[in-house]
Amino acid sequence: MCLAIPAKVIQVDASGGGKVDYLGTKVKVDFSLLENVRPGDWVIVHAGFAITRLDEKEAQETLTLLREIAQAQGE
Amino acid sequence: MKELRDGAVTRALLGKIGLKAAALGRPIRIMEVCGTHTMTIHRYGLKALLEEAGVDMVSGPGCPVCITPNELHEACIDLVTQKRNFTLASFGDMTRVPTGRGSLQTAVPAASSRVKIVYSPEEALALAVGNPAQEVVFFGVGFETTIPAIALTVKRAAEKKVPNFSILAALWLIPPALRAILEAGETKVSGFLYPGHVSAIIGLEPYRFIADEYGVPGAVAGFEPNDILLGISAVLDQIREGRPGIYLEYGRVVNPLGNPVARAVMEEMLEPRDALWRGLGRIPRSGLGLRDNYCTYDARSKYSLGIKEQSGDLPGCRCGEVLRGLISPPQCPLFGKKCGPDSPFGPCMVSFEGACFVNYKYGRGKEKG
């Protein structure tokens, strides 16, 4: 039930509502649980609310770690 | 992001895990707390691969649908079958959980009443605003992932003074449940895979007592197969070094401090209560209920619901033992025979992230009890 999906913010209204792009579909999402959300940000959506952001730098670090593990094994 | 599912990376990680587990020279059992982890572990065949590598994965109490006891379902069934002009709004899974009196889906609502499936608490509030002649109760179930959304929805209902909206709270906190499992000591756990999205709200500190008081290591992991393996590998490192801690593998989504805005809404609206979990029993301060000043939005007080244990689990259902990590689903005599997704005996077979459903869907015939 705690399934939550990553989506890209496309519109933020003054009321805290707005829209995200999820796999090409525009979905209404409430951003009130996050501060300073802007179009272009990536967020994680659960039960109609964005509950956290997706941090690109952290994502890259995990991916680099995984690449290194695969590489070390291949050597 | 293909590295998160890449087979070569998976093989490399499994190789590392195998070597680390062998070096420890004792059985390693890791509890995945979250049902979404259970799903990934079975969907990608990691359960069997990890077993070969020397790591036994056991499912925990990680699905709010599964741990909500039948008495709360029955209270909802009572409301919608006895009250007229009444809407019981609920997440879909919850409507299919069987009790001795049927489920919300088989219940016959009273005149002008109905059960309505919603995807968010806001939808339930919108139903109340749009239908002033209907009393709307939202069956508000969730772990910390979902609780802020529910709390914020009640706050908005209060701000707008919506008179015909309330929630029946089934709000559960993960850290006290893990303490209960450790205290009971029935399931020997070498480490925990902590839930990713619960952690996005609460951060890492609430798990600290598990390492400090019980010496049990853990990792917060994401939901892709290689996320999970990376988390397990980190747990094995902590065991080897004798330094239990909380490794954050899911840093792309989880801030170590959690989500302060979400936590503030929870704090403002809700307070801890002792709560009865299916399988785990009554756990001190493991649930949340609305604070007194919001009691008009609390279906328990609004309708004077005297919720007490009614029929309990269906006869023969062993979901309780599954949720405590005592048995794996195929060890239940009903599993795959009398109990399946079409005719569930318990919630673990209902929820798409329930351990029984996941075992049924991905592991049928591969694992014998």
Image (cartoon, coloured by chain):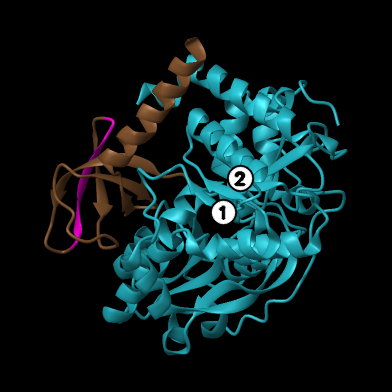
Chain colours: A brown, B cyan
How would you rate the neighbour count of disc 2 (Cα within 10 Å): few for under 14, some for 14-19, many for 20 or more?
A: many
B225 with respect to B213 (left or right): left
The C terminus of chain B, quarter of image: top right
The residue where tag 1 is placed is B245
What's the amino acid at mark 2?
Gln
* Labels 1 & 2 near each other (Cβ < 8 A): yes
Give the x, y percent position of residue B23: 72, 30
Q: Image point 81% across, 58% down: which residue?
A: B185
- Does the magenta segment cover residue A22? yes
Q: Secondary structure at mark 1?
A: loop
The magenta region covers A16-23
**Inter-mark Cα distance, 1 to 2:** 7 Å
Q: Image point 63% across, 67% down: which residue?
A: B176
Please report, as a chain letter, where disc 2 is located. B
How would you rate the neighbour count of disc 1 (Cα within 10 Å): few for under 14, some for 14-19, many for 20 or more?
A: many
The N terminus of chain B, quarter of image: top left
